[in-house]
Amino acid sequence: MQQMTPQFFGRIGRLGLIVFFCLTLGLMTAGATLAADYVVGGLFSITGPQSYLGEPERNSLEMAVAEINAKGGIKGKKVKAVIYDDEGDANKARLNATKLIDRDKVIAIIGPSLTPTSMAMIPITQPAKVPVISCAAGVGITAPAKERPWVFKTAQTDQLAVSRIYQYLKKHNINKIAIITVSSSFGASGKEQLNKQAPNAGINIVAQEVFGEKDTDMTPQLTKIRSTSPQAVICWGTGPAPAAVAKNMKDLKIDIPLIQSHGAASKKFIEYAGEAAEGIIMPAGKIAVYKDLPDQDPQKAVIANYVKKYEEKFKSPVSGFGGYAHDAAAMLFTAMEKAGGDKAKIRQELENIKNFPGVSGVFNMSPDDHNGLGPDAFVMVKIEKGTWKLID
């Protein structure tokens, strides 16, 4: 029999500590398993020049997660959102997408906010087979859908925006236009659609100019445009630069309609452009003028509910950009109610979504269409006295 020496009691003490830590670790692991969440990623341009897109998108995702958890979560599990800021930078979008997949083990990603950051992320998320619901407009983000089966989007496409603009121009006998587009993939995609759809719409594009995302003076390009005597100018861009185009046109006294893309449909654009915003026309989601919609419009109640909750929670006006994240979260949670955390099944359920009324339109997804919106997702609005007026 071993003697009860001080060394003996020391060994017993160390053994006891080891047993204690093992039991504690085991209990902690078991607890973590029982309380495991569905982890959803968010990737938005929360800071930088495009923050007016990303900030409301982040807010809307956080609000949607809080609401679903308040209702008991999904299949008995809570939803956790891990959100990163890509600052509108394609490299940071790629790095953060990798982090969401490899470190955070997300089952789906909502975002990014922009076409360039969305396009940059696809080579990361597609082979990883993680469902992505982008909040950006470029039609190439999801098309062709058969080549990007894991990518969906909620923002209306530039293809639909151009179609809606040309429909408006034809109605007002405008067929000779100039275009000025930003030198990003968003601008390139818009320019491609403007040129592609012009012949069938009977539109003659007499001048095509380009500006940089951070440019502040487009006077040289607009001077060239003026020399071609167009009936209207279409500007395609996001952030402060399109507002500079509006100011430059006013300074040059180019007194013809300026039509902005849906990328400028936010109160922030009006703030950037100041007095030069007055009279500008653009396609916009119905949220800009939802109070003027007929009561039978399938989106009106959805938008009104979203606006009320957002403005009460964040004490700031909503925008269509936040609506993109709202719709993405709503459709993702609907898919998860059926698929749980199985990424392949979530993808399939997203593709099956039909007649889903959202802030941005009524979604009808299919294997060939991962946006699921039609031309009726846009209305034409005009800026008057610092706010939107429904004109078509």
Image: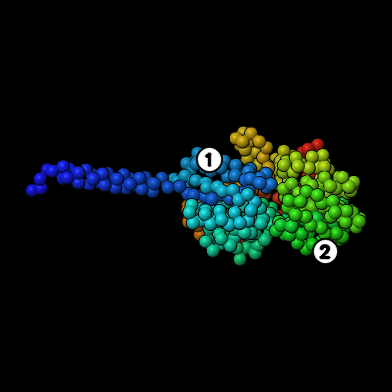
Left or right, 138 with reference to 242: left
The amino acid marked with disc number 1 is Ala
The residue drawn where x is 17% and y is 45% is: 7
Q: Amino acid at mark 2?
A: Pro
Residue at 83%, 49% (x, y): give it: 258
| Residue that mark 1 sits on | 66
How far separated are the C-alphas under marks 1 and 2? 48 Å
Residue 264 drawn above or below residue 131:
above
The location of residue 167, given as percent across then percent down, is 81, 54
Outermost residue, front side: 6
Sequence order check, earlier mark of 1 and 2: 1
As rendered, which of 232 and 51 lies closer to the eye?
Answer: 51
Q: Is residue 362 among the parts visible in the rendering?
A: no
Locate residue 63: give its quadrant: top right
Residue at (65, 62) in percent of width and height: 143
Work out whether 65 lies above or below 208.
above
Q: Residue furthest left?
A: 1
Figure disc tally = 2
Give the vertical position of 266 relative to 232 (above or below).
above
Q: Position of residue 13 (x, y in %)?
A: 21, 43
Q: Is residue 341 among what the camera can see?
A: yes
Residue with the mark numbered 2: 199
- Left or right placement of residue 7 versus residue 110 in this view: left
**Residue 220: x, y in percent?**
85, 54
Q: Residue furthest bottom?
A: 147
